Amino acid sequence: MEHTDVIIIGAGPAGLFAGFYVGMRGLTFRFIDPLPEPGGQLSALYPEKYIYDVAGFPQVYAKDLVKGLVDQVAPFNPIYNLGERAETLEKEGEHFKVTTSLGHTFTAKAVIIAAGVGAFEPRRLGAPGEREFEGKGVYYAVKAKAEFQGKRVLIVGGGDSAVDWALNLLGTAQEITLIHRRPQFRAHEASVKELMEAHNAGRLRVLTPYEVRRIEGDGEVRKAVIFHNQTQEETTLGVDAVLILAGYLTKLGPLAGWGLELEKNKIKVDTTMATSIPGVYACGDIVTYPGKLPLIVLGFGEAAIAANHAAAYANPALKVNPGHSSEKSEEKAPA
Ligand SMILES: Cc1cc2nc3c(=O)[nH]c(=O)nc-3n(C[C@H](O)[C@H](O)[C@H](O)COP(=O)(O)OP(=O)(O)OC[C@H]3O[C@@H](n4cnc5c(N)ncnc54)[C@H](O)[C@@H]3O)c2cc1C
């Protein structure tokens, strides 16, 4: 059994920033996350998208924001238990005990849950060939634009992701076709206007109301058969990549059975980010309280509150108020 002062469940932006503050308070901590790398949704879903609403950054790539968070917490020697999911949370005497999907048992004096939207997986279309060609030309996110360099890409979806990527891949992909099952898009008006201008200028093609009938290939994607969902008329497109951006399915996962007070699959917290279990705090997309918004900047603020309260719980000799980081002595300040 391995012990730290605090366990942080989830290494997305909220969890990483909570780690920074726990480290600033001189406590030891570990992150547990089933993803292979830290960063949560930013690393898994949109590493190469710009974020425009992080205070102090007019625009920042999601992956660069994650790098900054990882660098910021690094001086405090975090332990990363990546590739494993927290399965159970129990109180044993003075300590919390967390077991993971890899069979590890970790203990801590306090716990911070920053599990975002829980486990997330892409919403699949259910079209023949889709599963078969996953990883061989069927994508559910753009991890790196370079993957689409010189390719004929079919994008499926009608929200911001689909519209933004159709525009973002101009100049990278050889040919872009965007299909959506409805005539109207659910994306920002300005982006839809830009999309239709690109369509009218012949820089990409927009087809509605179209859906995917099947995906075909020979080890790799070669063709997609699409159909007009009112006339049923089929069209075969020669494509090298099918980028399906139809949203995500989220599931709370094991957290649901930990005895926490929940509301609509979110953890209820008070103004100190305390959950209904004393010593267990939460922050980020996983929490709910009146006025909550699922935004990164709010997650940062909540992380600061959760971490400082968790620190004072784990070590009652500590005050909750951390003071100003700019006034820390050199030994305590990050390198
Ligand atoms: C395409 C897209 C664009 C976005 N753009 C913006 C934007 O411009 N501005 C903005 O503010 N927000 C944006 N968001 C929302 C933003 O990404 C989230 O608000 C943010 O990621 C929440 O951070 P988090 O740390 O709370 O959760 P997450 O980023 O979801 O991270 C939670 C982590 O917890 C892990 N986890 C889940 N269950 C367990 C478990 N049982 N054990 C261990 N770990 C677990 C997950 O694997 C994940 O890594 C966007 C989201 C998407 C999908």
Image (cartoon, rainbow, N blue to C red):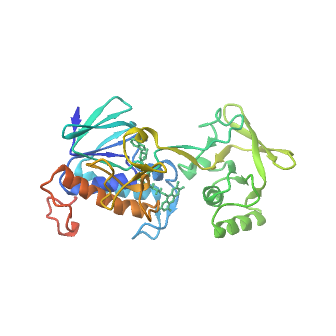
The residue under the point 68% across, 68% down is: 194
Left-right relation of 46 to 23: right
Across and down, in percent, residue 23 comes to: 23, 53
Left-right relation of 144 to 176: left
Q: Quadrant of residue 109?
A: top left
- In the rendered image, the quadrant that contains the C terminus is bottom left
Across and down, in percent, residue 203 comes to: 73, 61
Across and down, in percent, residue 263 comes to: 45, 51
Taking the view exactly as shown, the residue that stands out farthest to the top is 103
Out of 17 and 51, give the one closest to the viewer. Answer: 17
The residue under the point 64% across, 57% down is: 159
Across and down, in percent, residue 241 comes to: 66, 44
- What is the total number of numbered labels drawn onto the structure image? 0
Out of 64 and 28, give the one closest to the viewer. Answer: 28
The residue under the point 23% across, 42% down is: 108
Q: Quadrant of residue 320?
A: bottom left
The residue under the point 70% across, 69% down is: 193
Out of 239 and 280, give the one closest to the viewer. Answer: 280
Left-right relation of 63 to 137: left
Out of 110 and 328, give the one closest to the viewer. Answer: 110
- In the rendered image, the quadrant that contains the N terminus is top left
Q: In the rendered image of this protein, does residue 8 appear above or below residue 159? A: above
Left-right relation of 97 to 137: left
Q: In the rendered image of this protein, does residue 191 appear above or below residue 44? A: below
